[in-house]
Image (spheres, grey):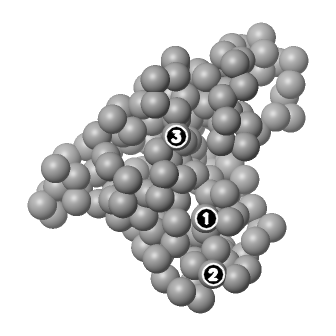
Amino acid sequence: MCNYLDIDIVSQQLTIYEDGIKVQCYSVSTAKNGTGELTGSECTPTGWHKIRAKIGVGQPLNSVFIGRRVTGERYSVDLGELQPERDWILTRILWLGGLEPGKNRYGKVDTTWRYIYIHGCPDHLINGNPGSHGCIRMKNADVLDLFNKIEVGIKVYIHE
């Protein structure tokens, strides 16, 4: 059973830990603007979080979400080329909530109300480089796999 998730900004890796042992790693992409907690910063927040909600059960791979609701669209390269400026949220959403008051919870640093997620994105965007607007992006098959392995409430540690 998964004890917690570790997201390493430097290596752009998300690791599942069970009983203190690394059991699986995934490549991710964190914020292009680096780390930070302030609302509007488009930075990835650091510290301890939890998965506060899992969104997208039963939706097909590459389903498109806006405002945490499925749109009925399915991402494709053609759709991506038609809307290159769009920040694609695909397949599944793991909505994060900060656990450290004053750092990533409450007020202008609240991860939940910044709408910071672990979510799928066009797979080609996962290339070892930060590129998101604050969220943790994953390949679609990877976020689906992770989604199916964890429960709401699991802790997530994000660090440099």
User: Real-space Cα distance between discs 2 and 3?
Assistant: 22 Å
Is residue 22 in view? no
Q: What residue type is labelled 2?
A: Tyr
- For disc 2, the marked residue is 106
Of all residues shown, which one is farthest toward the top? 78
Q: Residue 54 carries which label?
A: none
Label 3: element kind: strand
Label 1: element kind: helix
Of the numbered discs 1 and 2, the one sitting upstream in the chain is 2
Of all residues shown, which one is farthest toward the bottom? 102
Of the numbered discs 1 and 3, the one sitting upstream in the chain is 3
User: Real-space Cα distance between discs 1 and 2?
Assistant: 9 Å
Query: In the picture shown, does residue 29 fall above or below 142?
Result: below
Q: How crowded is mark 3: few (under 14 residues within 10 Å), some or many (20 or more)?
A: some
Which residue: 42% across, 50% down?
Answer: 13
Of the numbered discs 2 and 3, the one sitting upstream in the chain is 3
- For disc 3, the marked residue is 55
Residue 54 at x, y = what percent? 47, 45
Q: Which sits in the foreground, 45 or 98?
A: 98
Q: In the image, 156: left or right of 12?
A: left
Which residue: 59% across, 88% down?
Answer: 102
Label 2: element kind: loop
